[in-house]
Amino acid sequence: MITPIDSFDPINFRHFLHQYPELSQHERQTADVINQQLRQFGLVPKADLGGHGIVVEFDSKNPGETSLFRADFDALPIHENACHHYASRHSGIMHACGHDGHTASLMMVAKYLCTHPPVTGRVLLLFQPAEETGSGATAMLQEPWLAQQHIDNVFAYHNLPGYPLNTVVIKPNTFACASTGVIIELFGKTSHAAKPENGVAPTYAMMETIKLIQQLPEQFPDVFALTTVVHASLGETAQGKATFGTAPGYAKVLATLRSDSSETLLMMKSLIEQQIAAQCQQEQLGLKVSWQEWFNAAVNSQPHCQQVIHQARRLGLPVNIVEEPMRWSEDVAEFLAKWPGAMFCLGSGEQHPQLHNPDYDFPDALIATASQLFCALIEEKHGNMSDMPID
Ligand SMILES: [Zn+2]
Ligand SMILES: [Zn+2]
């Protein structure tokens, strides 16, 4: 599916990626396809950055700003319910978040830059793995070459069902929430169900844990804070059958915590740790708390938001400046914490299936919209505006 530059079609490219989705940190084949397509364009990308990450650089050799455009390319452990010809060929894995489309959009920008290279400064196109698990951006930033770059502008987008097609959705400051998963395990001692006093059951502590998690947002009335208990289990079952003769000695609670500020999320984390530890000590229960998939809040700079809005309006795209941040998280946050920039969304259509649904598919029309908006930002910062092919 690697094609010469003249015959490169980003929609075909997206459909090809869609057929071979790979899970976070296992995107070897996808990274190879991206790398080979860039090489086919005559470019020399840097590969294997922080795992399967790729960066390709366009250097004008003239002074000026450095801009970084980022797309993600991992898929999800969801079984696709497809009604199109390019359905996933990897059973149980699908591009249910549209990262195939984000990647195809950035590849289109690469094609554009081959014929319209920057006149000033440098443009970096960054293809990031492992976004869904919140580990890819951090891993790439551990590469000294990337970490040492001085970047003036970071831009990225995500498609967004529920909003009209092609609408630019953006806000300054926090755009996507900070979030984390937590696994809380309570260890007591089983006993005969007829003699529960001989054991240590974590039943009450588990209920208190759930209550604490659910009431936690009330302690932060001035900010956005949300907790969701996603799983809870108590006691043992033997091959799925209830063990009526045994009083429980173990409980497990899983929850997701969110906030529009990383600082609030840190406070929520330490409150949970302190209060559950106190509860367990009181009841002589063992405790293990593990935090997983930590995402910082993705924070947009005001000027970069304005630049996106300005170019979107120039292209005639509808713009929706939202009041509330997206409740989901995006690990572009790591780039935006290091360098200033803006992430925005492009509406996928009001009736479009939601992200991570088995019937979701990236809307191909967004490839042109996103790449034109990225190219407009590049022309504004690095080029000659009279060159614009999209006017
Ligand atoms: Zn996703
Ligand atoms: Zn996504």
Image (cartoon, rainbow, N blue to C red):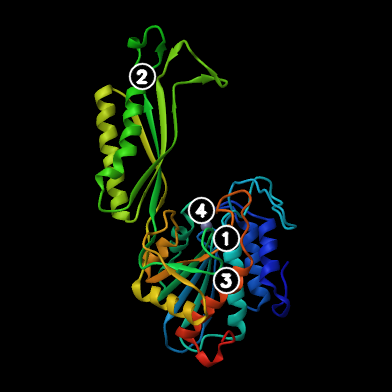
Residue 88: x percent and y percent?
A: 69, 53
Disc number for residue 201: 2
Mark 4 or 1 closer to N-term?
1
Residue at screen point 47% across, 88% down: 120
Contact, mark 1 vs mark 2 (Cβ under 8 Å): no
Real-space Cα distance between discs 1 and 2?
Answer: 45 Å
Q: Is mark 2 within 8 Å of ligand 1?
A: no
Real-space Cα distance between discs 2 and 3?
Answer: 54 Å
Which residue carries the number 1 mark? 99
Q: Is residue 44 visible?
A: no
| Amino acid identity at mark 3 | Leu
**Which residue of the protein is positioned furthest toward the bottom in this rendering?**
386
State the SS at label 2: loop
Residue at screen point 30% across, 49% down: 266
Residue 374 lies, with reference to residue 171, above or below; the image says below
State the SS at label 3: helix
Which residue carries the number 4 mark? 132
Disc number for residue 106: 3
Residue 359: x percent and y percent?
A: 63, 51
Mark 2 or 3 closer to N-term?
3
Q: Is mark 4 within 8 Å of ligand 1?
A: yes
| Amino acid identity at mark 1 | His
